[in-house]
Image: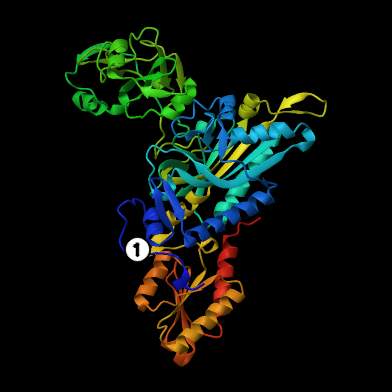
Amino acid sequence: MKISEIFAPTLREVPAEAEVISHILMLRAGMIRKAASGVYTFLPLGYRIIKKVIEIVREEMDNKGGQELMLPIIQPAELWMQSGRWHVYGDELFRLKDRHGRDFSLGPTHEEIITDLVKGDVRSYKQLPLLLYQIQNKYRDERRPRFGLMRGREFIMKDLYSFDKDNEGLDVTYHKMYDAYIRIFTRCGLRFRPVEADPGAIGGSGGTHEFMVVADSGEAAIVYCDTCNYAANVEKAESVPAPGNTDENMKEMQEISTPGVKTIDEVSGFLSIASDKLLKTLIYRTEAETVAVIVRGDREINEIKLQNLLGSLQLEMADERTVQEITGAAPGFSGPLGLGDIRIIADKEIMQMRNTITGANKMDTHMLNVNPGRDFEPSQSADIRLVREGEKCPRCQGILMEARGIEVGQVFKLGTKYSEAMGARYLDENGKEKLMVMGCYGIGVSRTVAASIEQNHDKDGIIWPMPIAPFHAVVVPVSVKDKKQLELAQQIYKSLNEIGVEAVIDDRNERPGVKFKDADLIGFPLRVVVGTKAVEEGIVEIKHRRTGDVRNTAVTDAALVIHKIVADEIAESMPIS
C-alpha cells in the first residue's frame, strides 16, 4: 500500500489529553482518535494491529478446543438479577431501558448470558467439556477513563467460558487456557508474568491468575521471587510473618501522654521507638458490621484481603464520628483495648509481638507494653496486610522483588457460582443431575496493543514486535522526483508483497527526514531506503528499527534478505510446543 493513500494523520505535537506513552504515540502515529471520554476510533494502522492480535488469540483458542461464537452486547437485566449482580456490579454497569421500560445493560462481561445459553441446550455429560469464546467490544462506565486504551469505557476483549463436569475437568481446562495465554503473549512479543490474583467482581471460589506485562507505567504492583517462580499481585500476595519477640518478658501496661501526636511516624518519633513496635488500629465499616483491624505500625492493611475475609460487598474506613463512638477518641488514638463487642481482626503477625505501643482510646494518650493475648484477644487472626519488596517469599527462602505491571489477561476458576445461581445442570453417567463447573478466561485485546507500546518505544516513537506490526517494512525512495529511484523502490515493494512480506511504500513528495521520522514514529520494524546508491551502485540500505543496525544490500537481494529477517523474528516469537 502507498503511504500517500493510508489514512494515518500523524501529529508532531504531544496531545494535551494524553498521559501515558502508549496514548501519546497512538494519537501521534495516527492510529486512534478520541470520540468521547474513554471511547476511541481505531484508524486503519491501529486496526491492523488489533486484527493481528485477534488472529493470534483466535489461533490459540481454536488450538485448545475453543469454539467461537458471538453473544449479544445488549443483555436483559433479568439475567443479571438471577446471578445477583444487577445491584452489586456498581456504577460501572451501563444500564438502559427499551421503549417498553424494560431494563438492559451493555455487556461488561458475559457470564450470565453464556450460562443461560448453555443451560438451555446442554443436558448430558456427553456434551461436556464445552469451551465457548467470543472477541467483541465490552462496555464499562469507568468513573475516570484515562490512559487511552489502558482504561476506557469501550474496549475489545476476548472472553472464553468453560463448562466441565467436575473440578478435575476444570483443572484440565484451566491448565489449557493458562498455557494458551503463555503462547499468546509470547507470540505478541511481550515480556510478561503470570501472577496469582484476586477474582474481584467476577467472583468464584477457585484460583485465578493475571497476566501482567511488566512496564514502569503499569497501574498494578506485583511482587515476584528472585529464586522460584512465585509471583502475585500485591492485592493477593501472601505474607510471611516477621520473627516476633515472644521471648521478651511481658511488662506492665503504662499510659503515656502524647499531646497532638496521632500518626505512626509522629508517635515513633515522639517516643523514639521504631514503628515496627507499634500497633495500628483502624476502624472499618461494611454493609453488615463495624470492625477494628490491627496491623503492625510499619505495615499497611490490604483492603482486598480484608474484604474477602469479611465476605462483604462494601468496605470503607469509618468516619470520624463512628470512630469517636466506638473508641471514645478521635482517629489517631485508637487501640484494641476495651472495644466492647466489636469484632477485632488482627494480622497474623500481631500475636508474635510483645510489649507493643497502641492508642489508648483516649485523646492525646497512648499505651505502652500492650500484649496481645494478655491485654486483648482478637476475634480472628489472618493475613490482612500488603506485602512489600524485600520480604521473604511464601514458597521458598527467596526474597520478593517488586515491579509494575499492566494486566492484559486473567483466567478464573468460577466453580459453580453462576451455574448454581442460574440453574445450569447436566445429567451424569448415572442420570443424576449435577451443576456444571465453570471457568472464564479474558484477554484485553486493545489493552494488549497499548501494553506492547509501553514496553516497546524510544524517544522517536513505537518499536513494534514483528508479529503484530501494522506492516513489516516500509520502502522509502529518498526522492520520488528521481524516476529511477522510484522505479527501484516500487520494484522492491512489489517483490516484498509477492513473497509474503507486508510492506508499504512512502511515495509522498516529502523531505527524507520527514519520511524517516514518520517511519520511526509509526514503528515499522524495517526501513528500506532507496537513494542515489541504489541508482549508481545497486545498493539499498536496510535499517532495523529495534536495534538500529544498518545493512547495505544489493537491490536484487533486498526482498529475500528482508523476508528472512521477518520470518526469523516471527519464528523466534513462537513458543516451543
Residue 391: horizontal and vertical position, in percent? 41, 36
Name the side, left or right, on which 446 lies relative to 520.
right
Residue at the farthest bottom position: 536
- Residue at the image point whose x is 26% and y is 19% from the top: 331
Residue 384, compared with residue 169, is above or below; it is: above
The residue nearer to you, when weighing 124 against 213, is 124
Residue at the farthest left position: 259
Name the side, left or right, on which 372 lies relative to 484.
left
Residue 76, compared with residue 279, is above or below; it is: below
Residue 461, compared with residue 217, is above or below; it is: below
Residue 184, compared with residue 469, is above or below; it is: above
Q: Quadrant of the C terminus?
A: bottom right
Residue 513: horizontal and vertical position, in percent? 35, 75
The residue beneath circle 1 is 11
Residue 390: horizontal and vertical position, in percent? 39, 39
Crowd rating for badge 1 (residues with CA inside 10 Å; few <14, some 14–19, many 20+): some
Give the quarter of the image for residue 11: bottom left
The residue nearer to you, when weighing 526 against 73, is 73
Give the quarter of the image for residue 481: bottom left
Name the side, left or right, on which 154 lies relative to 362.
right
Residue 70 seen in the figure: yes
The residue nearer to you, when weighing 409 against 336, is 409
Type of residue at label 1? Leu
- Residue at the image point whose x is 44% and y is 41% from the top: 222
Instruction: Report helix, strand or loop for mark 1.
Output: loop
